[in-house]
Image: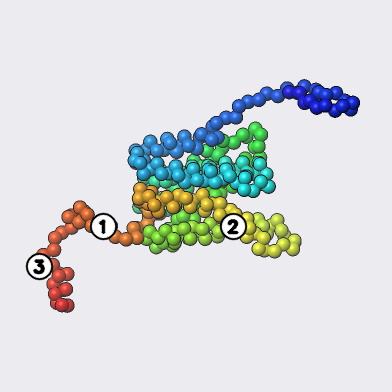
Amino acid sequence: MVASADLGGLGAKEGIPVAFNWMQASVLPVALPWLAILLLLFFKPNRCPRAWWILAPVACLTWGIGSLSDLWPSIPSGASDALHDSVAALAVGVAAVWLLSPLLKSRFRILNGLGFLFVLEVFSLVIFAITQDWNETASQAAAACVGLAICAAFIPIAAGLAGLLCRQRYRPLVLCGGTFVTLLGLWMLVLLPLFLVQTAGQNVPAGAVLAPVLVAAGLCFGVLLPFLLLSFLNSLFRERLTRLLRLAPDSPPPAGPDSLLQPATGPNDPHKIRANEIA
């Protein structure tokens, strides 16, 4: 490669040749998340058309975070790339939890929460690590990996605590609001001590820590929200979400063939006798 410019009488038109080895960009960082989800869709409980809707929130998050650099051009390219890879990895991790939740069917809420945490951490960190160029940006990738691990830990904790706020009932608004508020509290517990240590002896308003807390909590909740909306609209994933968080349906199931299994009531039924006495 040779740089060339007509400088008139100021010097040579061409500079010293420089060797440059060009390599085609790998498609692995783009294709790997989708390949992971497609493989999980071959899992037996996911072999139905309703399970393929899991691609919708992943696509929305990938497209949304990909357009971030267009909306805010002032964001450095390195930070934008790390944020994009982190959100994409988290999206795959949550999708993996939703697709593998039939395996997380313990009677104990804590075991379901640990399974949620394990699947989300493993898929998110593995996807993120494989898609990074550790030779070029090792320090930046390592810092992003730590932040990703914290986000992947806070999401199941917040969802589990929000499930407790629902009082074992399926309440979408309480679940969403409780999750966001819990994420705010968790990030405040982490970032407030760091803020106090770094600003010790400085005249910095305490409200300055609210901005990073809101950004971090909003990022975690923004990744989880599309999957919650999918669960609210899709009966397959709604059933899995309620089983994962140990929530009961908000309304009693409609009468169906199972009602035939109930014992028939006769004239000597105590409830009918009591109703006749009241009448």
Instruction: Name the residue carrying label 1.
Output: 254
Q: x, y percentage for residue 197?
A: 69, 57
Above or below, comparing residue 222 to residue 42 in the picture: below
Q: Mark 1, residues whose alpha carbon is within 10 Å: few (<14), some, or many (≥20)? A: few
Left or right of residue 133: residue 33: left
Which residue does the numbered mark 2 point to in the structure image?
Answer: 214
> What is the three-letter code of the residue carrying label 3?
Pro
Residue indicated by mark 3: 267
> In front here: 165 or 260?
260
Pointers 2 and 1 in contact (CB under 8 A)? Answer: no
Q: Nearer the viewer, mark 3 or mark 1?
A: 1
Q: Nearer the viewer, residue 71 or 167?
A: 71
Q: CA distance from mark 2 to mark 1?
A: 42 Å
Amino acid type at image mark 1: Pro
Place of residue 202 in the rendered image (x, y in percent of width and height, measured from the top left):
75, 61
Secondary structure beneath label 1: loop
- State the colouring used for the structure image: rainbow
Q: Secondary structure under badge 3?
A: loop
Quarter of the figure that contains the C terminus? bottom left
Q: Earlier in the sequence, mark 2 or mark 3?
A: 2
Distance CA(mark 2)–CA(mark 3): 63 Å
Indicate which label's residue lies in the foreground, 2 or 1.
Answer: 1
Alpha-carbon neighbours of circle 2 within 10 Å: few (<14), some, or many (≥20)?
some
Q: Residue placed farthest to the left in the image?
A: 267
Residue sitting at x 79%, y 25%:
4
Give the Cα separation between the discs numbered 3 and 1: 25 Å
**Residue 250 appears in view:** yes
Q: Position of residue 148 (x, y in %)?
A: 56, 46
Regarding residue 149, the answer to whether it shows in the image is no
